Amino acid sequence: MKTPRPAAHETLPAWLHEGARVYDPGRDREAIVQAIADYEDPGTRRFIRNAVFLRPEGGGMEWIVEPGIPRPPDAR
């Protein structure tokens, strides 16, 4: 059974959820969504609503993108 989406995520496309494989055109690579949450960068104090936390499949350094950046993996 799929967990209901938090109300804050209702504006996001259905394919964008934790565990989804996505394509980040800025890095020209596919990744797995680790989390979607509000984020404030501690260095710049810049706030991102529904920031998408990505990690390469198999592990590696996580990175954060705005919710409008990721595409479905077949969008290359």
Image (spheres, rainbow, N blue to C red):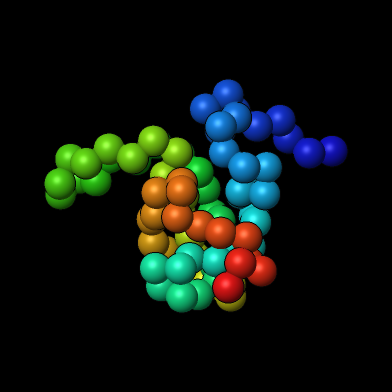
Residue shown at 50%/43% (left/top)?
36
Q: In the displayed structure, does residue 1 sit left or right of residue 26?
A: right
Towards the viewer: 15 or 34? 15
Q: Would residue 47 be seen by someone viewing this image from the given angle?
A: yes
Give the image location of residue 69, x and y in percent.
45, 55
Give the image location of residue 2, x and y in percent.
78, 39
Residue shown at 40%/49% (left/top)?
66
Residue 30 against residue 10 in the figure, above or below? below
Q: Residue furthest front?
A: 75
Give the image location of residue 68, x and y in percent.
46, 48
Q: Would residue 32 be seen by someone viewing this image from the given angle?
A: no
Give the image location of residue 28, x and y in percent.
46, 75
Q: Quadrant of the N terminus?
A: top right
Residue shown at 46%/46% (left/top)?
67
Towards the viewer: 13 or 59? 13
Towards the viewer: 70 or 51? 70
Q: In the displayed structure, does residue 52 sit left or right of residue 4?
A: left
Q: Quadrant of the C terminus?
A: bottom right
Q: Residue furthest left?
A: 44
Q: Residue furthest right?
A: 1
Residue 5 against residue 41 in the figure, above or below? above
Q: How many marks?
A: 0
